[in-house]
């Protein structure tokens, strides 16, 4: 969905670029684990 934002991040240690997805805490749902 369109609830997260994606940013282009650069690792200052090695100069590599990564896509970083930021999801607001209020949009996250708890995961229920069943045994």
Image: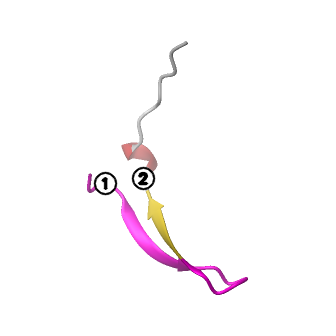
The residue lying at 31 percent from left, 54 percent from top is 3
Vertical position of residue 15 compared to residue 24: above or below: below
Give the number of the disc on residue 24.
2
Q: Residue furthest right?
A: 13
Q: Quadrant of the C terminus?
A: top right
Query: Can you identify the residue that label 1 sits on?
Result: 3
Under circle 2, the secondary element is loop
Left or right of 14 on screen, residue 3: left
The residue lying at 61 percent from left, 82 percent from top is 16
Percent of width and height locating residue 27:
37, 45
Q: CA distance from mark 1 to mark 2?
A: 8 Å
Q: Which residues are magenta?
A: 1-17
Occupied quadrant, residue 15: bottom right
Percent of width and height locating residue 18:
53, 74
Q: Residue furthest left?
A: 2
Percent of width and height locating residue 20:
49, 67
The residue lying at 45 percent from left, 60 percent from top is 22
Vertical position of residue 21 compared to residue 13: above or below: above
Vertical position of residue 24 compared to residue 13: above or below: above
Q: Is residue 35 magenta?
A: no
């Amino acid at each position: 969905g369109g609830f997260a934002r994606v940013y282009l991040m650069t690792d200052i240690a090695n100069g590599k670029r990564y896509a970083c997805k930021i999801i607001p805490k209020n949009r996250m749902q708890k995961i229920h684990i069943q045994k």
